[in-house]
Image: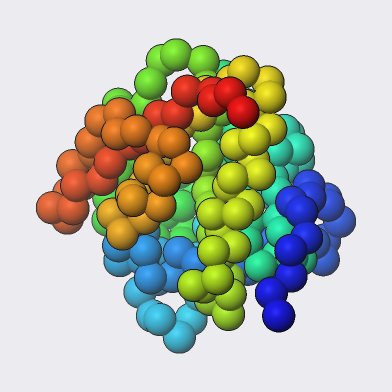
């Protein structure tokens, strides 16, 4: 029987953070935007885990808006209005970090994707859903959308809008069911077109 626990902040201790990173890395291992770049070998997720680990840990430590449900069966990583995905020091070291993982060519592709994401990002204040992932063992149970719905209820209570990029077009309808509306598009170098989505706070 599926658990119905509520979303909780991911603790900053190592075990909880490692579990959250593992869920994100596994969840994005088949993502059409990120997997071609970060998962060159489907049987080896070390590169992907190192990459996503930087973003999950950085956001959690600086903003405390990283949530998990049912342990780390689903994980969401949010940034507040004006928040940055990496700290100033991490941003300064990012080229070295990414190049060591992906090589020069991989870093150039990553940089181009990042620039296209940034160009599409709205300027209005909002809470940004940086990452949302479900552990493969729990897919198809609605747990990811349940976590997202709880997060959105919190932002609704604050009267704050939210924004995301749907890196997998298969998820667009799920986001729309929770009140997100298409905001724009991002054309990737691979030919894939992503939808960006915005949600105004909703009254109960």
In the image, residue 131 sits, relative to residue 183, either above or below, namely below
* Residue at the limit of the structure toward the top, as seen here: 124
Q: Residue furthest left?
A: 191
Q: Closer to the camera, 178 or 73?
A: 178
For the C terminus, the quadrant is: top right
Q: Quadrant of residue 197?
A: top left
Residue at screen point 69% across, 32% down: 154
Numbered circles on residues, count: 0
Q: Position of residue 126 (x, y in %)?
A: 52, 22
In the rendered image, the residue lying farthest to the front is 204
Outermost bottom residue: 43
Can residue 84 be seen here? The reply is no
- Is residue 65 left or right of 152 when viewed as pictured? right
Identified at 45% across, 29% down, the residue is 199
Rendered view: 143 above or below 147: below
Q: Is residue 172 visible?
A: yes
Q: Identify the residue at image location x=50%, y=67%.
A: 27
Q: Give the percent coordinates (x, y) of residue 63.
A: 72, 33
């Amino acid at each position: 029987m599926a658990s119905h626990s509520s979303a909780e902040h991911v603790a900053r201790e190592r075990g909880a953070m490692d579990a959250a990173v593992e869920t994100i890395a596994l969840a994005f291992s088949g993502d059409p935007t990120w997997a071609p770049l970060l998962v060159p070998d489907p049987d080896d997720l070390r590169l992907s885990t190192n990459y996503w680990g930087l973003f999950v840990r950085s956001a959690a430590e600086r903003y405390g808006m990283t949530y998990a449900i049912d342990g780390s069966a689903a994980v969401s990583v949010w940034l507040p209005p004006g928040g940055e995905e990496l700290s100033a020091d991490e941003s300064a070291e990012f080229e070295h970090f990414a190049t060591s993982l992906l090589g020069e060519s991989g870093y150039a592709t990553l940089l181009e994707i990042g620039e296209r994401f940034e160009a599409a990002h709205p300027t209005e204040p909002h809470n940004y859903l940086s990452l949302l992932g479900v552990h493969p063992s729990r897919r198809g149970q609605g747990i990811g959308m349940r976590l997202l719905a709880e997060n959105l209820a919190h932002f609704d209570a604050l009267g704050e809008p939210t924004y995301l990029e749907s890196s997998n077009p298969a998820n667009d309808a799920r986001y729309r069911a929770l009140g997100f509306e298409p905001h724009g598009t991002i054309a990737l170098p691979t030919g894939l077109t992503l939808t960006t989505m915005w949600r105004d706070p909703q009254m109960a």
